[in-house]
Image (cartoon, helix red, strand yellow):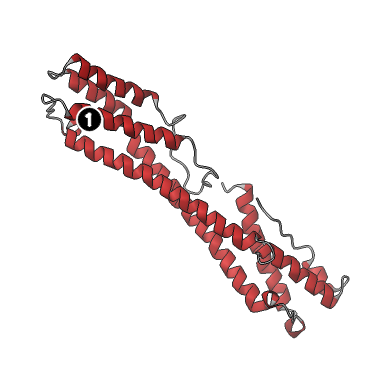
Amino acid sequence: MASTSEVGHAKNVANFQDLIAFVNGYGATYNPSKNSLKLPQLEALYTQASASLDNVVNKNTEYNNAVNNRVEAFADLRPLSTRLVNALEATNASKEKIDDAKGFNRKIQGKRASKKEEPVDPNQPAPKTISSSQQSYDQQIQHFEGMISVLASEPSYTPNETELQVATLQTKLQTLKDTNAQVSKAYAEVSNSRLERNKILYSDDKGLVDTAGEVKKYVKSVYGATSPEFGQIKGIAFKKEK
């Protein structure tokens, strides 16, 4: 479900479209001298604002998909880590080396991404700040890399099971790094898309909300405060969202 603020942004843009429709109906009598209030500029601003909303939605979906991909990639890390320790214990590895592997395993088992992260609805708004779980994922990657280093250093660690072999684990490690990095990249993109949308809608003087206010003032000045024309548009609400 979209957040209240996301709905507010869309409502501002929809109301701006309504405002344009009314002033377009006034014909040649709607003739402001200020260029930004002329109909072609209003229509261009509406198009730009509408596109910025679409961009936020698209970037938001990409972010949530990246989060879901990361959840899937990390899902088996904890049980896999335990299997790796068991496999190492079945070799000629020294007690010290096995203890090193167990240490990394304990860290992996204990470094769940804050609370367990579940797949998210692709339509759910991305958070306004990236969560502390990002750091937890970074740490899990480091611990898993340490585990692989211990296994690779043991000559007798040559399991027949493909999923436990060092080459397979290194591929797994790269997948974890890639999916984790994609979340960071996708979050930066959705955050930047919000900044651009807010600039178009809410920047002083040139933003959609301020422009709508100026259109209302112009209509009021031309047709009068009690005119039917001003009566049509005075109640169209615009609000600056945070």
What residue is shown at x 57% (from left), y 69% (from top)? 47
- Up the image or down, 207 lies above or below 118; here it is below
The spot of residue 195 in percent (x, y) is 56, 55
Residue placed most toward the observer, 167 or 76: 167
The quarter of the picture where residue 90 lies is top left
The quarter of the picture where residue 81 lies is top left
The spot of residue 40 in percent (x, y) is 63, 78
- Up the image or down, 119 lies above or below 104; here it is below
* Element carrying mark 1: helix
What residue is shown at x 60% (from left), y 47% (from top)? 3
Q: Is residue 118 visible?
A: no
The quarter of the picture where residue 178 lies is top left
Name the residue type under label 1.
Ser
Mark 1, other Cα within 10 Å: few <14 / some 14–19 / many ≥20? some
Residue placed most toward the observer, 55 or 135: 135
The spot of residue 122 in percent (x, y) is 47, 48
- Up the image or down, 240 lies above or below 226; here it is above
The spot of residue 134 in percent (x, y) is 43, 37
- Up the image or down, 69 lies above or below 91; here it is below
- State the residue position of label 1: 149
Tell me: 103 left or right of 92: right
Tell me: 218 left or right of 97: right
What residue is shown at x 79% (from left), y 65% (from top)? 234
Q: Is residue 196 visible?
A: yes
Residue placed most toward the observer, 124 or 209: 209
